[in-house]
Amino acid sequence: MNKLLKTSIAIAMLALAPFAYACDYPKKAELPDGATASKEEMLAGQSSVKAYMAAMETYLACIEKEEQDTLATMTDITEEESATRDAALTKKYNAAVAEMELIAAQFNEQVRAYKAQSE
């Protein structure tokens, strides 16, 4: 192979590397308005929240695996670089978990509003 072709292939591989895992952040769950929702709408909201939580669990596993695999391919990584990468992963992970907790709390609030309006 000539040098230009090898260089082009290497650049293409580097450019496409971030898409190898595609840890897509899930779309937020659709939450019903508990004050006005029907039982069917509340059940649909519950299904949406469950699907969102499952998708978030998949996302969390994906970002962890992606980081493990990336670290496995890195050579001569310093302790500082490792600590920086670990801190970034922890921040990303914790932000996702915080959002999951927020969605769960918001849905529970709507369940309480639904129960109050149906009494």
Image (cartoon, helix red, strand yellow):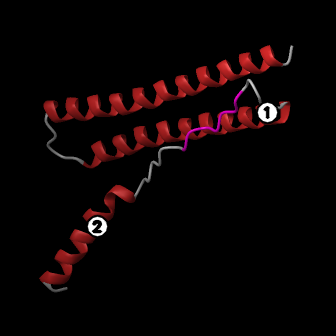
Q: Position of residue 8 (x, y in %)?
A: 21, 77
Q: Position of residue 76 (x, y in %)?
A: 14, 43
Q: Is residue 63 above or below residue 4?
A: above
Q: The residue under label 2 is which amino acid type?
A: Met
Could you say which quadrant of the image residue 31 lies in?
top right
Q: CA distance from mark 2 to mark 1?
A: 45 Å
Q: Residues within 10 Å of mark 1 (few under 14, many from 20)?
A: few
Q: Position of residue 104 (x, y in %)?
A: 61, 24
> Closer to the N terminus: mark 2 or mark 1?
2
User: Looking at this rendering, what residue extends furthest in the bottom direction?
Assistant: 2
Q: Nearer the viewer, residue 75 or 16?
A: 16
Q: Which residues are magenta?
A: 27-33
In the structure shown, which secondary structural element does the residue marked by tag 2 occupy? helix
What is the number of callouts on the image?
A: 2
Q: Is residue 32 magenta?
A: yes
In the structure shown, which secondary structural element does the residue marked by tag 1 occupy? helix
Location of mark 1 (residue) = 43
Location of mark 2 (residue) = 13
> In screen coordinates, is 14 left or right of 41?
left
> In screen coordinates, is 59 left or right of 112?
left
Q: The residue under label 1 is which amino acid type?
A: Leu
At horizontal 54% and vertical 28% (from top left) the residue drawn is 100
Q: Position of residue 50 (x, y in %)?
A: 68, 34
> In screen coordinates, is 3 left or right of 95?
left
Could you say which quadrant of the image residue 113 lies in?
top right
Q: Residues within 10 Å of mark 2 (few under 14, many from 20)?
A: few
Magenta span dominant secondary structure: loop
At horizontal 66% and vertical 39% (from top left) the residue drawn is 51
State the quadrant of the N terminus: bottom left
Q: Nearer the viewer, residue 97 or 10?
A: 97
